[in-house]
Image: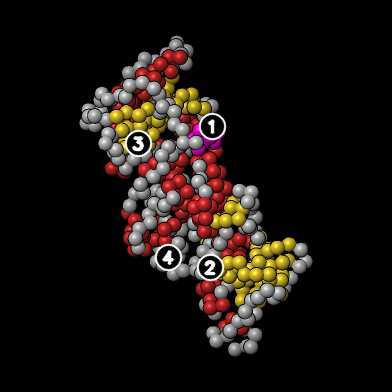
Amino acid sequence: MAADDSHDDRTRSFTVLSAGTNIGIYRIIEKIGVGGMGEVYLAEDTRMKRKVALKFLPAHLCQDDDSRARFYREAEATTKLNHPNIVTIFGVSEHEGRPCFAMELVTGQTLGSLAKAEHLDFERIIDLTLQICEGLAAAHESGVIHRDIKPANIVVDEKNRLRLLDFGLAAAKGTEQLTRTGSTMGTVQYMSPEQVQGKGLDHRSDLFSLGVVVYGMITGRTPFGRDNEAATLNAILHDEPEPPARYKADVPDELQRMVSKLLEKDPSMRYQSAQGIMSDLKRMVSRSQVSVMSQGVVQRRRGPVWFVAGTGLVLVVALLYLFMQWMQVTTTGGRKMLAVLPFENLGLAEDEYFADGITEEILVNLSQLSGLGVISRSSTNKYKGSDKSLKQIGKELGVDYILMGTIRWDKSGKEERLRINPRLIQVSTDVDLWADRYTVVLNDIFAV
């Protein structure tokens, strides 16, 4: 064995890194962090006269081939990414047998620390989620899957700019896997179901982990965290998460719907890209709902509480009818076509049948309106949970308007309540023509 093949020497000891140690053009100032896969030092770039962070593979892992490969994988994966929401790598080298790389020094706090220290309102949560998506979109477009998205790997600086870091588990197209088939790597509470099962991963695994992160920002807890690792893994595979609204009042329905879709166990049912999430987030902002909801304000109609069976449903249909009269839908200019998309259930999975029943009743009532053509449920059901745009759905169905909404059945209090949030969208402009929120107290659930 050659004397300079230092990393093959399993008995080798390594020089302690201390202030003043020169690593090429970098001079170490102090140690600022340590983790399972790296020690981080503050250093000065003597050529560029700037502060950087130097990350070294821990000495006890330097003789482990998998650990070295994983460390270099992080540097390789991050170096090929150039995006404002991803930490920048300046160079990769080795010092006395210890792999290291220099990276952008980001001063701030991790997303986990930020969430604990501050009250994150919905506007801030949406902004942070958008930035995470921006970084993930850039990584995924370059063929890089992070595989360990969690609050500790997300840093927010003083200017509220977010960076993704620690691509140590990243997988890139065309590279060999670091782990054997059937094994798992990652942080347990943030793993996707396919990660838990040791299956092949694609970018949608990162999106599931993002859903866990966003759920945590909203509720202050993880959706699948249990008392031990085995129970947590089982929950990821089999349990449906509690709706975020159970832990925080007035969660915007669209935000809750987005989180639910991210946490789908079947990758084909999740968002299919980070861009799709960004589109929905930007739509929330553009509708000017965020500024109101971030203050915890929900507009409610004044008047009597509706007790009789089906009153909430009648109210939706009646107001929609009045709105369409105002639009002169029934004029001789031709019959207008409407599609009623399946209303989304924001409650327990076991209540899905209830949301389907409400959708069916609304569709039947609207079909009786003169001058209005309503697409059959068999044609609209295939769009349940679809990522397609409303314009695309409208074009495929040949409709002028789309009615959609959410339904939440709250059984937590003394009185069971039903909240219906309908929206009427004009397909040609993708603009909300009408939307409202109705809360109904249920006395006779079977009658409803």
Q: CA distance from mark 2 to mark 3?
A: 42 Å
Mark 2: which secondary structure?
A: strand
Can you tell which mark lies on residue 35? 2
Quadrant assignment for the C terminus = top left
Can you tell which mark lies on residue 288? 1
Quadrant assignment for the N terminus = bottom right
How many other residues sit within 10 Å of disc 2, few (<14), some (14-19) or many (≥20)? few
Residue to which mark 4 is pinned: 184
**208 and 376: which one is in front?**
208
How many other residues sit within 10 Å of disc 1, few (<14), some (14-19) or many (≥20)? few
The answer to whether 35 appears left or right of 305 in the picture is right
Can you tell which mark lies on residue 408? 3
Q: CA distance from mark 3 to mark 4?
A: 36 Å
Mark 3: which secondary structure?
A: strand
Q: Is residue 57 above or below residue 304?
A: below
**70 and 30: which one is in front?**
30
Which dot, 3 or 4, sits closer to the camera? 3
Give the magenta range.
285-294
The answer to whether 258 appears left or right of 313 in the picture is right
**Looking at the image, is mark 3 or mark 4 earlier in the sequence?**
4
How many other residues sit within 10 Å of disc 4, few (<14), some (14-19) or many (≥20)? some
Mark 1: which secondary structure?
A: loop
Q: Is residue 398 visible?
A: no
**Looking at the image, is mark 1 or mark 4 earlier in the sequence?**
4
Q: CA distance from mark 2 to mark 1?
A: 41 Å
Q: CA distance from mark 3 to mark 1?
A: 22 Å
Residue drawn where x is 62% and y is 84% of the image:
5
Q: CA distance from mark 1 to mark 4?
A: 42 Å
Question: Where does residue 443 sit, x and y in percent of width and height?
Answer: 24, 29
Q: Amino acid at mark 1?
A: Ser
Q: Amino acid at mark 3?
A: Arg
